[in-house]
Image (cartoon, coloured by chain):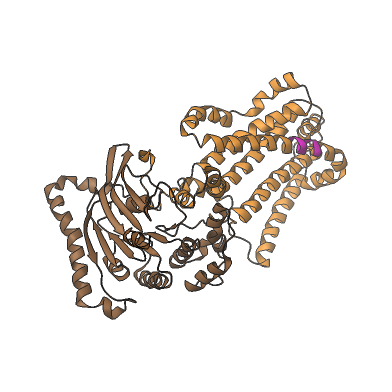
Amino acid sequence: MSTASARTPKLGVQAATKVYQTGSGDLLALDRCSLDVHSNEIVSIVGPSGCGKTTLLWSMSGLHRLTAGSILLDGKEITGPRPEIGIVFQEANLLPWRNLDANINFPFEIKGEKPDRAWIAHLLNRVGLDGFGGKFPRELSGGMQQRAAIVRALALKPSVLLMDEPFGALDSFTREEMNRLVEEIWLDTKTTIVFITHSIEEAIFLSDRVVVLTTRPGRVAKVYDVPFPRPRSLEIMATKEVFDLTNKIKMDIVGERRPKAQEQPEHKSAEIVRIRP
Amino acid sequence: MSGGDAIPEFSKAKSGDGQDVSLTNLSAFSSGPGIKSGAEVAAILAVAVVIIGGIELALRILHVPQYIMPPPSSIVYALFDEFPLIAPHLGYTLVELVSGFAIGAVVGLVMAAVITQFPFAEKIVAPYILILVTTPMLALVPLLILRFGFGYTPRIIAVALAAGPMVMINAATGFRRVDSAKIALARSYGASTLQIFWKIRAPMALPMILVGLMIGAIFGLLTAVGAEMVGGGFGLGNRLTSYSSMIQMPQFFAVVLILSTLGILIYVLFFLIGKKWASWET
């Protein structure tokens, strides 16, 4: 049993394919995307915008059904939202009519469970939101809102945390602070994390592996191991190894885009109106 | 099956669709400049005294006959003098307003909640709702009186018909403000359709629902008084026709004063409710 579970990935993405039906025809967002995420691992997914990163994450969360292929959680196919999976959305996604406490209680209300007060208090303390429970989202800064969203996602003690470009809207200092916070939480809980970002530095700072997706349709272009020790200090992040890795990933993303733009320069306007999933 | 999913979107403009609509409407709930000091209060009072006193003075100096325009002092005097006689009629009007509004608001809210769940049905129903909103329900009062007599019934029906569509059209705007990210959040915890309605859609719609209720109540008051003027021997509207036919202008204006107070009270009531429960929006 234990050997079997050691071999079964926490999240197994197998030939995931997703087609959206839009007004202007079908849109292939993900094309036979395969990827394994192991227990206690942080995997970042990077790629050019519109490459289907969010689609992949939403499919992992069970919010979207795949058109073909499957995603397995602990070997069992995901067909709908699962309690073991927590999600941190783009732009904190707090409910503006609830104060912070009520926002964090929201998942428990939906499930009809009693909130685990001690655990929530511990989390709030961990992210530095002690005493802010009565505040409404509009009274909090973007960083604080996202901290609250992280607490909300962790409140149900998920074994997998999916983070969908969570810090994209924050300024770079707040962003670095939030990255350190995620690292600390991971060192604490060892929760498996799938992290979507378009910041390569963020991906390298946080991840054990960085997965690069191709432009739409999204497919796994490359997977990089990030072998640096944790906690990752500023010194580590300033080494040549990190610099080289950043450049390699950048080349993957940019280099892949360039020939396409040269082939069809008349498609410039199409680039602008592109809907981003 | 899978084709039914919408492309996840997070752009600010899209989330909370209809934001611009609600902003203009919700300015009704913004508290305005707010009074800051005693000096401001004094200035506001002074202007009121000057205006009302000026009218009083002008009417008296120019010897304007009472049947054209009674001076403010005699209106206030008539208000207190006649109040025992007017009070029961105020009661009748309130009964019509409250019961008609309650019926109209409940029906309007339920219809808005149901109809917005079925976009196609909404398209079919929309023109009829528009007709209901734009047709003055007062026009139906003679017909209703013919059918139901001179009692409460035709008036309550008229109030309900006037208030209901106003509540519905605004509430529907509120319920249509779907924020896919918030619904996804609820769904990620396994929320049922009913839970999504009560915990996401309803709170998001609340500011617009309150706007609808306020407009509905004011339209209801209008229609109640109008219906009372058409026929039946009771209610504030009936007092208006009765006093004017007897050229009792101070009493007539006393009733008008009561009516405008009612209107202001309706506004203040919903303003306070909005401030308490829907202030997260502004």
Q: Residue at x 55, y 53 (%)?
A: A111
Q: Residue furthest top?
A: B146
Residue A167 visible here: no
Horizontal and vertical percent position of residue B212: 59, 42
Residue A136 in view, yes or no: yes
Q: Position of residue A261 (x, y in %)?
A: 15, 51
The picture places residue B225, in percent across and down from the top left corner, at 72, 34
The quadrant holding residue A254 is bottom left
Q: Is residue B154 above or below residue A133?
A: above
Residue displayed at 76% across by 39% down: B94
- Residues B244 and B58: in front is B244
For the N terminus of chain A, give its image quadrant: bottom left
Q: Taking B248 as reference, is A251 left or right?
A: left
Residue farthest to the bottom, as pictured = A235
Q: Is residue A22 left or right of residue B13?
A: left
Where is residue A3? Give x, y as percent: 34, 62
Foreground of the two, B89 or A211: A211
- Main secondary structure found in the magenta portion: helix
Give the chain letter for brown. Answer: A
- Tell me what residue is drawn at x 86 percent, y 41 percent: B82
Nearer the observer, A119 or A169: A119
Q: Is residue B2 above or below residue A152?
A: above
State whether residue B266 is above or below residue A96.
above
Is B246 covered by the magenta stretch?
Answer: no
Tint applied to chain B in the drawing: orange
Q: Is residue B35 above or below residue B160?
A: below
For the magenta stretch, what is the residue range?
A: B91-96
Q: Is residue A228 left or right of residue B253?
A: left
